[in-house]
Image: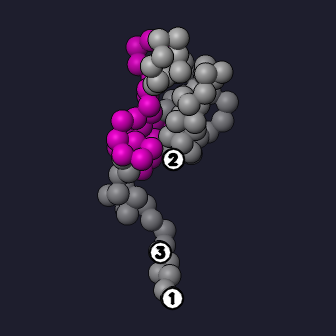
């Protein structure tokens, strides 16, 4: 909680250190925002090559802050059309 007793929903963007995995980024952002002792979130630059399969990628605003997505679950909206087009194989699991 911030000093105003409202949930934290923004965090400062820091310099990138490693390529992200998009689903992992969404989960990490939520965990980071749940703690008061975390101030920076890392994104790669340029961001576009790493935003595959997602309709609503995490992007900083004009102040360099990123916000928690507001959708269901982690807030990630997957681009199923892109995922299907780039699927190398499928496995059917049965009982």
Q: Which of marks 3 and 2 is in front?
A: 2
Of the numbered discs 2 and 1, the one sitting upstream in the chain is 2
Residues at badges 3 and 2 in contact (C-beta under 8 Å)? no
Q: Residues within 10 Å of mark 3 (few under 14, many from 20)?
A: few
> Which of 68 and 79 lies nearest the eye of the viewer?
68
CA gap, disc 3 to disc 1?
Answer: 17 Å
Q: What percent of the width, then of the height, locates residue 11?
A: 52, 21
Q: Mark 3 points at which residue?
A: 90
Q: What percent of the width, then of the height, locates residue 55?
A: 35, 43
Q: What percent of the width, then of the height, locates residue 19?
A: 61, 39
Q: Give the range drawn in magenta.
A: 48-75
CA gap, disc 3 to disc 2?
Answer: 19 Å
SS label for mark 2: helix
Q: Name the residue under label 2.
A: 23
Above-or-below relation of 51 to 17:
below
> What residue is at 52 percent from the left and 36 percent from the top?
30
The numbered disc on residue 95 is 1
Q: What is the image's colouring?
A: one colour
């Amino acid at each position: 909680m911030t000093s105003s007793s409202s949930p934290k929903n923004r965090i400062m963007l820091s310099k990138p250190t490693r390529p992200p995995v998009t689903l992992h980024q969404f989960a990490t952002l939520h965990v980071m925002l749940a703690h008061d002792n975390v101030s920076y979130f890392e994104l790669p630059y340029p961001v576009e090559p790493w935003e595959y399969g997602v309709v609503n990628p995490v992007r900083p605003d004009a102040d360099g802050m990123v916000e928690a997505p507001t959708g269901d679950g982690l807030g990630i909206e997957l681009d199923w059309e892109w995922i299907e087009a780039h699927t190398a194989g499928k496995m059917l699991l049965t009982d």
